[in-house]
Amino acid sequence: MIRFIVLLLIIFSIYTALKIVVRSAVKGYREEEKGRGRQIMGDEMVLDPECHTYVVKDRAVSRHIRGTLTHFCSNACARRYEEKNRA
């Protein structure tokens, strides 16, 4: 009789543990599905064509080169790029 009660307690414990694991997995899956359409809003980054680093667009040095607005990380990069691309 005692073996039966111990076995019943073990089975109940395993059932409870599995139930908790499954519920948390389903909850995580649902939260992931809800968040898929979201986009984290932040500062826009632009690529410096001279040194190939990304710069926050609001802080970048901007120049019009050949009719295109180009962004740089610094005035030095902008000057080097302009010197290389003079035609």
Image: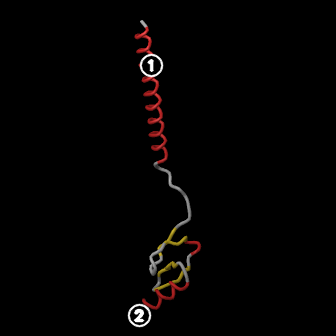
Earlier sequence position, callout 2 versus callout 1: 1
What is the x, y in percent for residue 46?
49, 72
Q: Residue furthest top?
A: 1
In percent of the image, x 44 and y 36: which residue is there?
Answer: 25
The three-letter amino acid code for the residue at tag 1 is: Phe
The three-letter amino acid code for the residue at tag 2 is: Ala
In percent of the image, x 51 and y 88: which residue is there?
Answer: 79
Q: Which mark is residue 66?
A: none
Q: Residue furthest front?
A: 2
Residue closer to the observer: 7 or 80: 7
Residue closer to the observer: 12 or 75: 12
Relative vertical location of residue 77 with respect to residue 42 in this rendering, above or below:
below
Residue closer to the observer: 56 or 15: 15
Q: CA distance from mark 2 to mark 1?
A: 80 Å
Residue closer to the observer: 44 or 3: 3
Residue that mark 1 sits on: 12
For the C terminus, the image quarter is bottom left
Q: Which type of secondary structure does the marked residue at label 1 adopt?
A: helix
What is the x, y in percent for residue 42?
56, 61
Give yes or no for contact between labels 2 and 1 (Cβ–Cβ under 8 Å).
no
What is the x, y in percent for residue 12?
44, 19
Residue that mark 2 sits on: 87
Tell me if mark 2 has few (under 14), some (14-19) or many (20+) residues whose alpha carbon lies within 10 angstroms of its own. Answer: few
For the N terminus, the image quarter is top left
Tell me if mark 1 has few (under 14), some (14-19) or many (20+) residues whose alpha carbon lies within 10 angstroms of its own. Answer: few
In percent of the image, x 48 and y 44: which residue is there?
Answer: 34
Relative vertical location of residue 55 with respect to residue 74 in this rendering, above or below:
above
